[in-house]
Amino acid sequence: MAQIGQILVDVPTMQTNDPYSYAIPAELEHQVQVGMRVVVPFGRGHRLVSGVVVGLSDVTNFDGQLKPIETVLDLAPVLNSELRQLADWLATTTYAFRITCIQTMLPNLLKTQPKRQVQPTETLTPAEMATYFPEGAPRDFDTSKLDATTLAGLLKLQRAGKVEVVYDVKNKAAAKTTTGVTPALTPAKLREIAATVSKRAPKQALLLTYLAQMTGDSAQAQTVVAKRAGVTPAVIATAADKGWLKKSTLEVYRDPFHQPVKPSQPLELNAEQRTAVTAITQAIDAQHAQNFLVEGVTGSGKTEVYLQSIAQALQQGRTALMLVPEIALTPQMVNRVKARFGQRVAVLHSGLSKGEQYDEWRRIDRGEATVVVGARSAVFAPVENLGIIIMDEEHESSYKQDENPRYHARDVALWRGKYHHCPVVLGSATPSLETRARAAKGLYTRLVLSKRAKAQPMPTVHVVDMREQLKQQGDSDFSEPLMTAIKERLKRHEQVVLMLNRRGYSSFVMCRDCGFVLKCPNCDISLTLHMDSHSMKCHYCGHEEPIPHVCPNCHSRKIRYYGTGTQKVQQALEKLLPTAKILRMDVDSTRRKGAHERILRQFGQHRADILLGTQMIAKGLDFPNVTLVGVLNADTALGLPDFRASERTFQLLTQVSGRAGRATKPGEVFIQTFNPDHYAIQLAQHQDYERFFVTEMHIRHQGNYPPYYFAVQLTASHEEEAVAAKAMYQIVAALKQGLSPAAIILGPTPKAIARVKRKYYYQVVVKYKQEPQLRPVLEQIRQAAQIPARHGLSVTIDSEPMNFM
């Protein structure tokens, strides 16, 4: 009986979670494996599409003639059993299609069609070498040009570990391969030839002597041989022609760690840290899927708790996965983990080149890296035998993906913890209300670190009422107390961190005669002035246009800049403090690869006095010489129409305050605000998380918001507002018909920013406690949305949204 493959196909216009049956050609039988990517003919036009093998069988329900698989894209599966199960769970919980979830898990390089080569390993026999590599070099793995017999043979060799596929990518950070050199003769024969070489060719003699000293059969890079032997590539080429050496292709590992890291030793723990490590390591030893919340004030030594817990997992021969919320935090955390665990560490985040990401992914897949550190998508790293999963700064909203599949990394981490029977550690100074509420219910074990690790005092926090400052000194970004404190730190050669949660030069441009505000033509939002590029930019769609000097509406020249941004603050600081060295860290200044790391390294080496940035500088950074933190406008998030506005403000202020006074020098914080009496600002001043938790939970309870209720947000968008609105009303009708009266349906309403990228957005929010019919109703809505999607109507479902804006 012929073998049949169950294939999930990738057809964007009509997705399905049901696999299609395809015949496996005789020559590929028992070579195709579950988890491989394949190319199959699809539809009446027999167009070729990619897919993933999710099952193999000998029978099918299909009574017609099965189409055969066209070819395979991989010689080995790219998804293991765990990740296939995870994709199924993810599809169910995020209302996404299985194929979308699978693609989310793969590194970028496997989602494209880069050039691929098959190269032999050292175990290949001479006969196999002659058959499959007649030219003696790696061959292109282009399945459209390989005959079925050769492809089947290569599949068998791959399963035996005799060949491997390497991926090449354009614009990569470094060459993927390099030329290798191996001696072709015995050391005695090479020395014999060296003695007879003409005196007019001293370089050849040097090379022969070096080749005679090379040990074993392993190749060395040609560049290394040339340098050590003191010869040029031309001399090596001549030696190859004379049969003294053999050239081969060597793979070059693209190392994302561009700076050497000094090894570190475990630190002495205080009593609270010891209690935390003991509890976590007991769960590791017992292989128990226990979930922990490490609630530690800023500077309480959470990282050391993580590192010593990881060490315990590694000691047992298991692996570790550690998540950090964004690229800005990755360099410092990666360096600490790398300093402790060396070459066993792999790093995964979007700041790496595609080639670096792929190399790291493959090191993990092969089991060469046993500790993985990375941002959100690293939660899908193909790590086997996990002993611990750690999620630092677990409250961060960047752990939630805002496009399909709309997963939260915390949920994926908890799923993987159960799968591997290992503890999951969620760490934060300001846990999300959902996590803290679960700890209060006993679903998570709460471990509290109430003091700073080295017993330093918490920084003194001052709240500056900007309403009073406005009366005294007019419109300024800096209050008098903050500016005095900055000057004092500069005199003492200490460092300052200033946070303003708005990039650009100015919030908007307005005509003082007619009140006209320059808006984005594609979005319902004003354009932001950027002085470095002398342009107006939209922070939603990227639209850019020149700065107007005349009002487009009334042609007045009284056009002025309002609001403030990081660029404008930097210019003001440079005027006020001409001797101070200032570094700016925001999305604009960190676009280039490695920019985060470079800025933080410069600041860490005290090559700047002031680090000015957006919220990316608020978390996780540890600089011993920072004794002053200034928050220029604490109200940025408070005014947003979002139920999490107060929580985000409290978290941000507490986190950024924690950057001050982390070593021996005492720290001080100034929070500038127009709302000094707001409970989020008052409680952040006293770093009182527990009181904030109780206050905010009371407000959430009154408003029927998470964590007391679950929530789902449905959004419809289209270039015509009427089409989006009509779709949303139809969706609301379906929800009301399918759900119980206990479900709270809010909407439909236009979104807070009603138009983005030329599309109008309407939304509805469903709040519920138990709705058994919710999933089938939402599945029905998702399936029905596929046909209108071809005509530009997009419907999205977001389970547990991070905001309702």
Image (tube, rainbow, N blue to C red):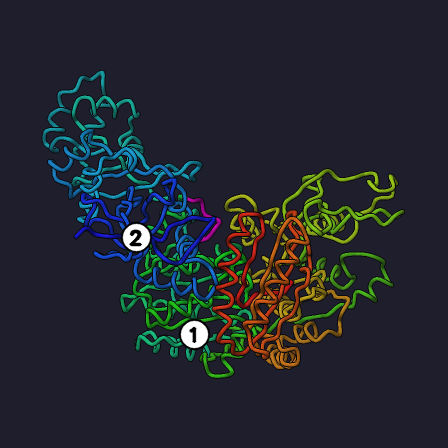
Name which residue type carries label 1.
Leu
Look at the image and give the residue range highlighted in magenta.
348-354
Label 2: element kind: strand
Dot 1: element: loop
> To which quarter of the image does residue 389 belong?
bottom left
Residue pictured at 52% horizontal, 62% vertical: 781
Query: Label 2: few (<14), some or many (≥20) within 10 Å?
Result: many
The correct choice, above or below, for 138 with respect to 110 in the image is above
Mark 1 = which residue? 269
- Look at the image and tell me in which quarter the C terminus lies: bottom right
Tell me the CA gap for discs 2 and 1.
58 Å
Task: Identify the mark nearer the N-term, 2 or 1.
Answer: 2
Name which quarter of the figure residue 184 lies in.
top left
Question: What secondary structure is the stretch in magenta mostly built from?
Answer: loop
- The residue identified by callout 2 is 21
Residue nearer the viewer, 219 or 647:
647
Horizontally, is 321 left or right of 748 in the view?
left
Q: Is residue 571 visible?
A: yes
Q: Is residue 787 magenta?
A: no
61 on left or right of 246: right
